[in-house]
Image (cartoon, rainbow, N blue to C red):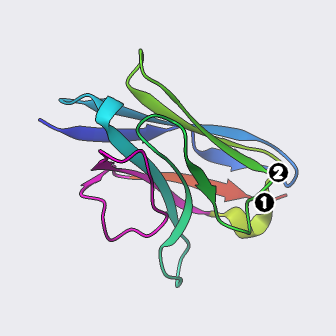
Amino acid sequence: QLQLVESGGGLVQPGGSLRLSCVASGFRVDYYSIGWFRQAPGKEREGVSCISSGGIMTKYAESVKGRFTISRDYAKNTAFLQMNDLKPEDTAVYYCAAVRDSENICFTDAVPYYYWGQGTQVTVSS
């Protein structure tokens, strides 16, 4: 069974940090680009960041540049999203997604992705 599972969400105060993990099972993510997306209540899903299969390309939404860092660990078949200096507007359900990548590129548009996790809640509040 091909599956992505996110973890690491929670409640954090403004200015705090969280590290989200996205573990793949049933397939190797070595040949897949990984994207992180989020959706807040009443808002459309937003592309947050992505990383290409070889890790050469990374992209970030303007709203998270300088605060979030995407990475991947091939040995652990896992991708990460380190989130620092969190703000209340970062509150959302965060999803990871994967798409086969033969060109070492990635997208923050959700359309190409076909493997999705179930999401993890991130709440930033004092």
On screen, residue 36 versus residue 98, left or right, reads right
Q: Position of residue 84 (x, y in %)?
A: 79, 45
Which residue is at the front of the view, 100 or 39?
Answer: 100
Contact check, label 1 and label 2, Cβ < 8 Å? yes
Whole-percent x and y of residue 12?
75, 47
Q: Secondary structure at mark 2?
A: loop
Rendered position, 79 above or below 63: above
- Residue 124: percent from left, percent from top: 74, 57
The CA span between labels 1 and 2 is: 5 Å
The residue range painted magenta reads: 92-118
Residue at image position (45%, 34%) is 54
- Give the residue at mark 1: 125
Q: Residue furthest top?
A: 75
Say which label, 1 or 2, has the lower sequence index: 2
Report the amino acid beneath label 2. Gln
Q: Is residue 112 magenta?
A: yes
Residue found 81% across the figure and 52% down from its top:
66
- How many neighbours does mark 2 have within 10 angstroms: few (below 14), some (14-19), or many (20 or more)? some
Question: What's under tag 1, amino acid-wise?
Answer: Ser
User: Residue reaching furthest left?
Assistant: 1
On the rendered structure, is 16 left or right of 74?
Answer: right
Q: Quick check: 105 above or below 39? A: above
Residue at position x 31%, y 47% in the image: 101
Query: Compared to 25, does 75 lie above or below?
Result: above
**Residue position marked by numbered label 2 in the rendering:** 13
Which residue is at a point 30% across and 65% down the rendered structure image?
112
Quadrant including the C terminus = bottom right
**Which image quarter is the N terminus in?**
top left
Q: Horizontally, is 58 left or right of 6 in the view?
A: right
